[in-house]
Amino acid sequence: MLREVFGDRVLRAMAFWMMAGRTLGDAPGEILKRAQWHEQNLRLDPKNVEQIVREAVTQPENPKNLYEISLIGPYAVPYLLEHLRTGKDDAARTNAAYVLVHLGPQVVVPVVEALTSTDGLLLEHVCDVLRKIQPADARAVHQLKRVFEDPQLLPTVRNTWAKSALETITGQAAENLKSIADYYYEEANRLYRG
């Protein structure tokens, strides 16, 4: 691993540290930091992410797969959403939803971005995933409310899936919540004022 990170320059790097006034006591920490950086870069490689997601979707009960995908976190969401979007394989779709719920609040923001889609099947699954993520995350409320109020979407998406997710997350009836304009105004004020 060290040879991959540093190549043959390990001795030159140590000599450089010593010439810069550092002791060899700093070297192990620096080597560890570079090794972790290299490992993270390998982990986030798109081909690697796709492979890990494929393994997690085909074998979600394997703790190693869930651990690997939890290390990737939000970077795996686009690949998992592709499995939710396709209507061909019910098992893969169910497993992708399970993995997203397992990842928890760290994936709420990228999952919420998928609510801008007009694909009814994807919206149903995304609403269901947001409903099941624990602890409930209020960052999803404004987009769920937009889906709930959008007359162009299918009634089942609005009145079943979005409504159920809203009520689970907020603990209130969806009809009694503020309008989407109020949610956007509050969010803009929060971001403006810090």
Image (cartoon, rainbow, N blue to C red):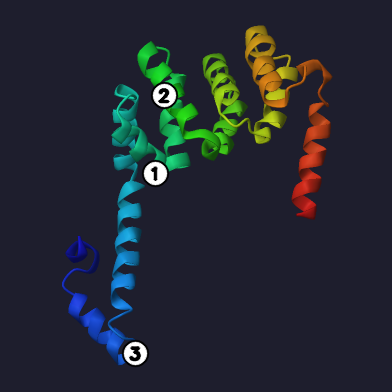
Which quadrant of the rendered structure holds the C terminus?
A: bottom right
What residue would you read off at disc 1? 71
Q: Which residue is mark 2?
A: 96
| Crowd class of label 1 (few under 14; some 14 to 19; many from 20; radius 10 Å) | some
- Residue 169 screen position, x and y as percent: 67, 25
| Crowding at mark 2 (Cα within 10 Å: few <14, some 14-19, many 20+) | many
Q: Quadrant of the N terminus?
A: bottom left
- Residue 17, compared with residue 150, is above or below; it is below
The residue shown at (66%, 36%) is: 139
Who's the residue at 34% across and 25% down the image? 60
Q: Position of residue 73 (x, y in %)?
A: 44, 41
Q: For the point 67% across and 21% down, which residue is it?
A: 168
The answer to whether marks 3 and 2 mark residues whose Cβ atoms lie closer than 8 Å is no
Q: Is residue 142 left or right of residue 72?
A: right
SS at mark 1? helix
Q: Amino acid at mark 3?
A: Ala
